[in-house]
């Protein structure tokens, strides 16, 4: 799975499936359930750490689900496999504001929705009008008021796959929208261009605290385990210096949590999803 994740680590999967369309996806989910084969949906491969032993079961990639469409009343419909940055650029092109922050978030809309990704005080689930998911039992449509969500969290049943969402936006000036996005990208370039493969922010921000600051205060900037390192640029980014294993990154995360707890009394929680088996 190293070729399919932004951290560039991890063992293989038993199966890797690229459904061509919704019918193809639905049929696969039914067959996988009948065969009792577990499955994992892969977005852009960011926010994910696959262990060195790989993944037992089937990994489903939604790379064919990339459609984005303008709807009346300042709304857009986006497929789960559409890249978050591409969605923000699309909205800007049509003078629709409210999701500029997506330009700074790697991965896909489906992945962003699944973890309620956000930046600069915004989150993606807060923009949803309706969400379409699928599981082996069929399709499910919900409005935002029916969703259970919080900071970096959206409740989905374990077998649910995000198919698409309709996002509620507002009319705006394309020039102003693009300028805001440029500011976000400049900030990201200055504070987050760490120069090595990474999964983005590794830990959630505890209430009232910034995870990067807690890690920095624990004296861990640049700390290394094998080929894994706490970034010198942004301490909530754990990077693969080129020869890291998943085990290196997991051990580094363990050390960080231990030292931050000892220094501040605060227990960090991973934002990155950790899957698979040990080697």
Image (tube, grey):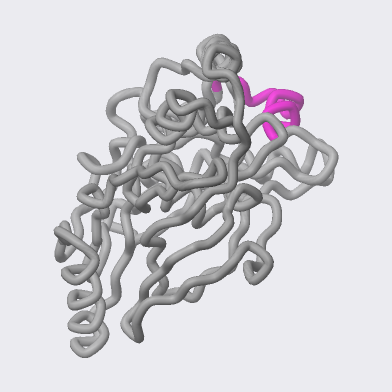
Residue in the image at 74% along x and 49% along y: 267
Residue in the image at 29% along x and 51% along y: 52
Asked if residue 250 shows in the view, the reply is no
**x%, y% of residue 110?**
42, 52
**x%, y% of residue 177?**
57, 19
Image quadrant assignment for residue 140: bottom left
Depicted 165 relative to depicted 196: above or below: below
Q: Residue furthest bottom?
A: 34
Q: Left or right of 263: which side holds 44?
A: left
Give the quadrant of the C terminus: bottom left
Depicted 132 relative to depicted 170: above or below: below
Residue in the image at 23% along x and 83% along y: 30
Q: Left or right of 255: which side holds 137?
A: left
Residue placed most toward the observer, 72 or 15: 72
Whether residue 155 appears in magenta in the rendering, the answer is no
**x%, y% of residue 157?**
49, 75
Q: Left or right of 59: which side holds 133?
A: right
Residue placed most toward the observer, 199 or 256: 199
Image quadrant assignment for residue 24: bottom left
**x%, y% of residue 27?**
18, 78
Q: How many marks?
A: 0
Depicted 31 relative to depicted 236: above or below: below
Residue in the image at 56% along x and 28% along y: 100
The magenta stretch is: 211-222
Asked if residue 43 shows in the view, the reply is yes
Depicted 269 relative to depicted 231: above or below: below
Q: Left or right of 275: which side holds 263?
A: right
């Amino acid at each position: 799975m190293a070729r399919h994740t932004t951290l560039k680590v991890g063992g293989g999967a038993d199966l890797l499936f690229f459904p061509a369309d919704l019918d193809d996806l639905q049929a696969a989910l039914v067959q996988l359930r009948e065969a009792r084969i577990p499955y994992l949906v892969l977005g852009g491969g960011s926010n994910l750490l696959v262990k060195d032993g790989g993944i037992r079961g089937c990994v489903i990639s939604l790379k064919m689900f990339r459609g984005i469409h303008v709807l009346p009343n300042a709304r857009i419909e986006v497929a789960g496999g559409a890249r978050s940055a591409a969605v923000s650029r699309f909205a800007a092109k049509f003078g629709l504001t409210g999701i500029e922050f997506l330009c700074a978030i790697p991965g896909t809309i489906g992945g962003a929705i699944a973890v309620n990704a956000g930046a600069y005080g915004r989150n993606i689930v807060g923009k949803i009008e309706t969400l379409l998911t699928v599981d082996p039992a069929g399709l499910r449509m919900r409005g935002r008021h029916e969703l259970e969500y919080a900071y970096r969290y959206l409740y989905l049943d374990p077998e649910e796959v995000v198919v698409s969402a309709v996002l509620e936006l507002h009319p705006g000036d394309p020039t102003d929208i693009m300028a805001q996005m440029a500011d976000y990208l400049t900030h990201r370039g200055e504070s987050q261009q760490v120069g090595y493969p990474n999964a983005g922010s590794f830990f959630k921000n505890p209430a009232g605290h910034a995870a990067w600051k807690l890690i920095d205060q624990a004296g861990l900037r640049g700390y290394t385990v094998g080929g894994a390192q706490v970034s010198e640029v942004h301490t909530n980014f754990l990077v693969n210096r080129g020869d890291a294993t998943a085990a290196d990154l997991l051990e580094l995360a363990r050390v960080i949590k231990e030292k931050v707890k000892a220094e501040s009394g605060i227990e960090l929680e991973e934002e990155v999803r950790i899957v698979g088996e040990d080697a």
